[in-house]
Image: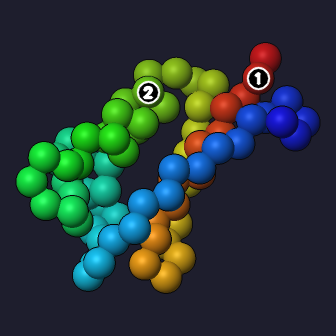
Amino acid sequence: VMDGVLHGEFVNYFSGSVNLDKINDLGYTTKGKDHGVGLSLVKRIVDSNNHFDFETTILDEFFIQHVIFKII
């Protein structure tokens, strides 16, 4: 916790390319069948609560969802 803000990260490995415009869509995956739920769930939680925010970055073959929770 820094200055009333809690930070967390979800890190996922990928191979090939990632479409950042679709990365939070339900069912979008780079891993094959029966994947593509987790990041869309994070996005839904963030969008439904004004205390959350997040940023997506790519580093080598990992994409990183940096989640920010603003503590009141």
User: Which amino acid, by three-letter code, is at mark 1?
Assistant: Ile
Quarter holding residue 31: bottom left
Q: Is residue 72 above or below residue 32?
A: above
- Tell me the crowding category of disc 2: few under 14, some 14 to 19, or many 20 or more residues within 10 angstroms, Cα based: few
**In what quadrant of the picture does the C terminus appear?**
top right
Tell me the tag on residue 45: 2
Question: Mark 1 highlights which residue?
Answer: 71
Which residue is more in the foreground, 30 or 46? 30
Outermost residue, left direction? 33
Is the image coloured rainbow, by chain, by secondary structure, or in one colour? rainbow
Q: Are marks 2 and 1 in contact (CB under 8 Å)?
A: no
Residue in the picture at 46% in, 71% down: 62
Outermost residue, right direction? 3
Q: Earlier in the sequence, mark 2 or mark 1?
A: 2
Tell me the tag on residue 39: none
| Residue 48 placement (x, y as % from top left) | 44, 22
Quarter holding residue 3: top right
Residue 10 shows in the view: yes
Residue in the picture at 40% in, 38% down: 43
Q: Is residue 43 left or right of residue 49?
A: left
Q: Is residue 18 above or below residue 65?
A: below
Q: Tell me the element at label 1.
A: loop
Residue 47 shows in the view: no
Q: Is residue 58 left or right of residue 40?
A: right
Q: Tell me the element at label 2.
A: helix
